[in-house]
């Protein structure tokens, strides 16, 4: 019993001490100070909306290819005895320069022989023409001789009839007449053969000329001349090598004649339609693609033609862009930046002009069709009509007015009609 009372008293003392400490803490506490909540108006930066004329540019990519490339090959067999010093990969060539030539010695001899045959045929014709002239003169003399012999025969017959001439004299006159007549007949026969002989001589001349033309053609085929100003893409022959007809000896392509085949998505064709009307050709700006850390030169071009069919796999419209130059390859001094076949390029096709269009950065859009505007120091959530999104810009036709202030600053928890403060340019507070 005494032990129980002792424990009970000890618990009561602890409780009294704890209660006293709690009461002292409650009495000595500091009363909290009241602080009124200050409502702050968010400050925003704004961009004025400006309407204007915008070009609907369409972007496409492609690989540069030569418009005119030629595979060089000989038409006759032979051994190469000449190769132009500039006929090597990457070198420039001039029009009508002899690039390759085979041994011409036999061909030159054949050409000389053919020329001699032509001269011989011409000489034979000249001789025949002179013979025609001679026969004409001989025919005149023979005719006169025949007339004289005929008169002499008539005279002798008259004298013999009156017995004033002997029979021998008459026979002699008849013999002279027959001889003159025979001479005229021979000349006449020779003249009648002249057309056939002339035709034969002319056919021989024509055959000789044909042989000469063939010899000249073979001589011409023994060398390859550059058909245009251009560059050598590949070389596959050396001096002394024997080549056969049709064997590819190299490839060249024309200078300032490069094309790019691009493919335009069908949904982008709406921005190019009006440009093609009445035979128009959209202008194109061509640059070298994927050039990080450097700036590519710009080459002008135009869409030359549209392919006949749509690509079934990609559902795009193939087009061919012809690239032009602006003075010595656009004035590019760095040879690594020259436009060459095989380069991957970016083509910006200039489409139709749209008037009264608002062109703003994509970052100003709050949703696909919503903008935040500042009107009378209050936020206005405005729906707009976006006709196109291209690269970092958005094109809007309705929902904006010139001079509207588009909010560019972030506004978490934005509500339509909430108060805002528009910061002026240069205001950092």
Image (tube, rainbow, N blue to C red):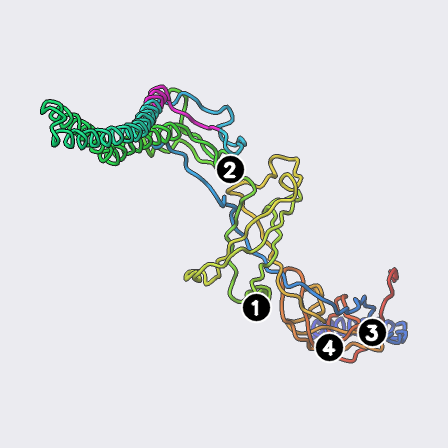
In this view, 66 is above or below 145: below
In the picture, measured across the screen, residue 14 lies left or right of residue 30, that is: left
Q: For mark 3, what is the residue?
A: 420
User: Is 164 drawn above or below residue 257 in the view shown?
Assistant: above
Element at label 4: strand
* Upstream in sequence: badge 3 or badge 2: 2
Give residue 113's position: percent from left, percent from top: 32, 22
Question: Label 1, on which residue?
Answer: 270
Can residue 237 be found in the magenta stretch?
no
In 3D space, how far apart are the residues under numbered discs 3 and 4 (Cα atoms)?
13 Å
In the image as oriented, which residue stretches furthest toward the left? 167
| Mark toward the start of the polypeptide (4 vs 1) | 1
Q: Nearer the viewer, residue 171 or 262?
A: 171
Q: Which residues are magenta?
A: 98-113
Observer-nearest residue: 46 or 209? 209
Image quarter hosting the C terminus: bottom right
Residue where numbered disc 4 is placed: 381
Q: Position of residue 274 (x, y in %)?
A: 59, 67
Give SS at disc 1: helix
> Element type at marker 2?
loop
Q: Are marks 3 and 4 in contact (CB under 8 Å)?
A: no
Label 3 residue SS = loop
Q: Which residue is mark 2?
A: 228
| Residue beneath the point at 58% across and 54% down | 302
Q: Is residue 241 visible?
A: no
Labelled pair 3, 2 in contact (Cβ < 8 Å): no
């Amino acid at each position: 019993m005494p032990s129980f009372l002792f424990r009970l008293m000890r618990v009561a003392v602890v409780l009294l001490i704890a209660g006293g400490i709690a009461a002292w803490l409650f009495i000595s506490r500091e009363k909290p100070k009241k602080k009124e909540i200050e409502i702050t108006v968010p400050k925003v930066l704004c961009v004025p909306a400006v309407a204007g004329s915008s070009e609907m540019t369409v972007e496409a990519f492609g690989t540069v290819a030569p418009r005119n490339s030629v595979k060089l090959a000989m038409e006759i067999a032979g051994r190469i005895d000449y190769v132009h010093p500039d006929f090597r990969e990457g070198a420039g060539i001039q029009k009508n320069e002899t690039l390759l030539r085979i041994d011409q010695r036999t061909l030159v001899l054949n050409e000389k022989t053919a020329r001699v045959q032509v001269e011989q045929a011409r000489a034979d014709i000249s001789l025949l023409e002179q013979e025609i002239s001679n026969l004409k003169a001989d025919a005149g003399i023979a005719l006169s001789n025949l007339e004289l012999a005929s008169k002499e025969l008539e005279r002798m017959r008259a004298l013999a009839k009156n017995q004033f001439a002997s029979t021998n004299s008459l026979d002699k006159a008849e013999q002279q007449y027959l001889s003159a007549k025979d001479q005229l007949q021979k000349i006449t026969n020779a003249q009648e053969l002249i057309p056939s002989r002339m035709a034969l001589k002319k056919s021989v001349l024509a055959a000789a000329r044909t042989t000469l033309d063939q010899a000249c053609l073979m001589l011409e085929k023994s060398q390859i001349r550059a058909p245009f100003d251009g560059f050598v893409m590949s070389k596959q022959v050396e001096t002394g090598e024997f080549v056969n007809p049709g064997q590819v000896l190299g490839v060249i392509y024309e200078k300032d004649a490069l094309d790019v085949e691009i493919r335009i998505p069908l949904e982008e064709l709406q921005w190019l339609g009006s440009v093609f009307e009445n035979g128009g050709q959209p202008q194109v700006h061509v640059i070298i693609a994927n050039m990080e850390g450097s700036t590519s030169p710009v080459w002008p071009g135009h869409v030359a033609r549209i392919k006949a069919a749509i690509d079934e796999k990609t559902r795009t419209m193939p087009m061919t862009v012809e690239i032009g130059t602006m003075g010595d390859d656009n004035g590019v001094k760095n040879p690594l930046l020259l436009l060459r076949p095989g380069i991957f390029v970016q083509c910006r096709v200039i489409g139709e002009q749209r008037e009264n269009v608002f062109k703003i950065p994509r970052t100003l859009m709050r949703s696909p069709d919503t903008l935040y505007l500042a009107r009378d120091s209050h936020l206005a959530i405005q729906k707009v009509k976006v006709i196109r999104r291209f690269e970092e810009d958005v094109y809007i036709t309705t929902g904006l007015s010139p001079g509207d202030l588009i909010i560019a600053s972030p506004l978490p928890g934005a509500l339509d009609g909430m108060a805002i403060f528009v910061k002026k340019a240069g205001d950092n507070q």
